[in-house]
Image (cartoon, coloured by chain):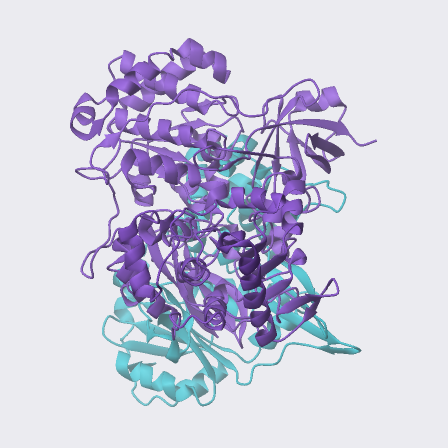
Amino acid sequence: MKILSPENLLIFLKDLSADFDLRLPVLLSDGSRSIGSFDEGAISLMGGALSAKPTSLFFPQEGLMFCNQGDNFTPPPLPAKPLFVVGFTPRDLLCLAFIDRFFATGLTDDLYFRQRDGAIICAVSGYCGRDGALIPPSDKEGDIEFIFDRTNWLILAYSVRGREIVSAILTEAPPDALAGIIDAVSQFDRSDELLLQQGSRLLADGLVPDSFWSEIADRCILCTGCNLVCPTCTCFGVQDWRYVDKMERSRIWDSCQLEGFMREAGGHNPMPTEGERTRRRIHHKLAADKTRWGEISCFLCGRCDAVCPTGIGIVSVVREMVARFAPIITLV
Amino acid sequence: MKKSLTLCPYCGVGCMLHLITDNGRLVGVEPGSTHPVSRGSLCVKGWNAFGFVHHPDRLTRPLVRRSGRLEETSWDDALETVVRRLKSVQDQHGLDSLMFASSAKATNEENYLLMKLARGVFGTNNIDHCARLCHSSTVTALAECFGSGAMTGSIDCIDSTELIFVIGSNTTEQHPLIGSRIINAVRRGAKLIVADNRNIRLARHCTMHLRHRNGSDVALLNSMMHVIIAEGLSDSEFIAARTENYPALAAAVAEWPPDRGGALTGLMPEEITSAARTFAAARSAMIVYSMGITQHSHGVDNVRCCAALAMLTGNIGAPGKGVAPLRGQNNVQGGCDMGALPDLYSGYQKASDPVVREKFAKAWGVARLPELPGLPLTHAMNAAAKGDIRAMFIMGENPLLSDPDQAHARKALENLDFLVVQDIFLTETAALADVLLPAACFAEKDGTFTNTERRIQLLQKAVEPPGEALPDWKIICELAARAGFSGMKYNNTAEIMTEIAALTPSYAGVTHERLKPFGLQWPCPDSNHPGTPVLHQGSFTRGKGLFSPVNYRPSAELPDEDYPFILTTGRTYFHWHTGTMTRRTNLLDREERHSFVELHPEDAVRLDVRNLEQVEISSRRGAIRAQARVTDMVIPGVIFMPFHFVEGAANALTLNTLDPESHIPEFKVCAAAVRRVV
């Protein structure tokens, strides 16, 4: 385990720019924190999860699939240098692992892995959450992790490449440097994780009536933000643009909250009501993915709850759902 | 990859967002997480705001019509042709044979410059923009009653009010981030009254839903005021201290007991009484309205009633209170503020006032400025159809789809000797142009937009325009120079704002630098002024608030045996106006692909029409086809159509009858027939 002061950590990161395309949380001119590069704003490692998902570096909102000119089909260019991405929280890493598996299963998604392969993933945790709140460190996920102990950054490497990179840091941390954080983590409030488990059970057991979903859907203004900020949402639509001299095919994030998402060419829609589509969003994460992948695909990153203009992000909805329908389980 | 903090190009809410650019190409959007209006959220259009920018249909070179065909040409040739032909028309037919249509999609700086070009260079007050079609009724009536035609408070007022009365606004679809605030207000305990006979989303959250007849707003509001006065629920202290002409209002609404109001509106008298009591009982209340109020042949009267109801109950001039006309376009407030209006200079300074003209003439370095008021856009189209307007310069508008009575609009445009269109796509209107000037879109230029709460905000360039396209302001400056005018040379849009501030009292304290990051709400009269979130505190802009009583006038064309339905028109959530941008945005276009008409199930049964079948909708102006959407969104006897679609254009059916004062067309009511297409 290495240790660096905040100033020296920045120097260390800047030095990496020679070999990597470095992306890290920056403070934009309006006070938003976002993944960017050194020249975009002050580095902002403090503040917790970024409002946009960092996985968009590998799967952007709109991404070129190929360009066609005559008989030539050109894929998007490979990165000039491998990405080095700082700013994933440990929960974001769980999301990343989930979509890594998703995009690698069956037909491998070449477009995703063109960006993802070779990228160094660096998590941030410790007392660097909002207002200095604790973000529990990861379970050795990603390549490297920066853990803030309120004064310095403790640096751990988990992968071969991570260890190579971190070996350049000479200052070793005291052996017990993590003890305080580990102790604090044992006290960490895990109630939202339990809440999701309860919600998952309610859905799997079919104990949530359709009327609940209609009620939640009434509050939805169909902004699609919940899907677009979700690191485990992977749905996209395809767009072909024909220019005079070429054709470009791109893919664009889509949303299961939209009526057109499931609509068939003839107009029939197997998911015709807003209530059904709202149910789908939550059910997919908490029940369907659990059946398919063995785990709930919400890792409580908090983004959909933050972006939703009417307060029906996943945690809010599940909290309401559990409060109203969980007693039924007890009775049963 | 970089992020540019800029503004959404769609509605008047004015959400700020970051456009994400990778190698000169937009690849996505991130909401501005700290913005006071959008607060880290966006609606579906905002999330897809980048989606049309690189579309293959973008205009990239100037086009000029030769032998009936639009052909590519150089900027020099296009600009020279425009100036020569416009001058030639004026030489032959007089200065006022020319009309300039500015754009609520363009920046404040561009609207100001087009106004300056029309008045200062071409010597005509014939300049207007699409505010004529949306909130001209508001500008007329609220200026009369309050002294200022803008939203009286801020969007934040929704967070603290006790009651929101939404009348003629489908807020969650047309101003989604304001709609969401209203939903949140209801969740914290605020009451919501919705007056709209469509079953809009907000109706699912309301305390009362008043499904009154189209065009009966005056009857409803007068009856509500009748109850408030009759039951002693009015704010007599406010009325005495802050208003004038109350006796006239009291006398007028005395004629409107709820049974009379009920008979005209189709509501139960008890519903009106209950709504009035609920409204008056709130310690703070807001009236939120939009085009359901303004787009009538009595639109100004509708707004007068809204203003009167607010004053009668003391609901104005404090946080959590007020009259909130939700401005439609991203910069329709700014278009008005900048004087892209036939009778007003920037800051609503009267063109008829010689002192105002003298001030602008001196600043612009011109000998004289035109005195007679110009033509409103709607009258200009009529004048073009008659041959009195001979040339038109249209910047960023598409009247062939947005104006009433499409056949009339086509006739007017085709009748012109010379038509210039400056736009980002080959719109239906642009296809008729003699010269077509390719413009930069919102993502490709700097400037400012002013949102519905009077917040002047910075638009910042993210990417280069395609091909040879230029920002509107640069094109206007080039035209001025070629017309021999030396007073329109700027290095950037900040310099234009400096000139605007010097000439416009309500913008006097505005500079681009001061607008970072989240803008200022006008009036901002000096460089230290923090802006004004709530107007009319202490006293109205005009001094005392004026009660302006009105009587009910029916809509111009009511259903009859031949045309038994009321057709009301509007927009959908996924498209913007004539679809120029949204129909070229993949996800938005996917959601709403077809022109449709909403038809109540009872009517559908009677007409033997099934959901999604093609029907023919006709009026005295024309006939179109669209997909039937059988739904209880509408009441029996009323059909609704959006006007986005060139195929099945609702405005082929609408009526070119205007409000006599605001000159707004009656888009919300005309008589129509529906039949199944066999």
Q: Nearer the viewer, residue A154 or A66?
A: A66
Identify the residue shown where x is 55% and y is 44%.
Answer: B573
Residue B363 image position (x, y, % from top left): 30, 64
Residue B55 image position (x, y, % from top left): 63, 64
In the shown orientation, is residue A237 left or right of residue A176?
A: right
Vertical placement of residue A214 versus A95, above or below: above
In the shown orientation, is residue A105 left or right of residue B362?
A: right
Kindly tell me whether residue A1 is visible in this rendering: yes
Residue B551 image position (x, y, % from top left): 40, 20
Identify the residue shown where x is 38% and y is 13%.
Answer: B256
Residue B207 image position (x, y, % from top left): 40, 25
Vertical placement of residue B50 versus B143, above or below: below
Q: Colour of chain B?
A: purple
Kindly tell me whether residue A5 is visible in this rendering: no
Residue most extreme to the front: B92
Q: Colour of chain A?
A: cyan
Residue B510 figure quarter: bottom left
Q: Nearer the viewer, residue B282 or A26?
A: B282
Instruction: Classify the position of the C terminus of chain B by image quarter.
Output: top right
In the shown orientation, is residue B115 left or right of residue B73?
A: left
Q: Nearer the viewer, residue B175 or B313?
A: B313
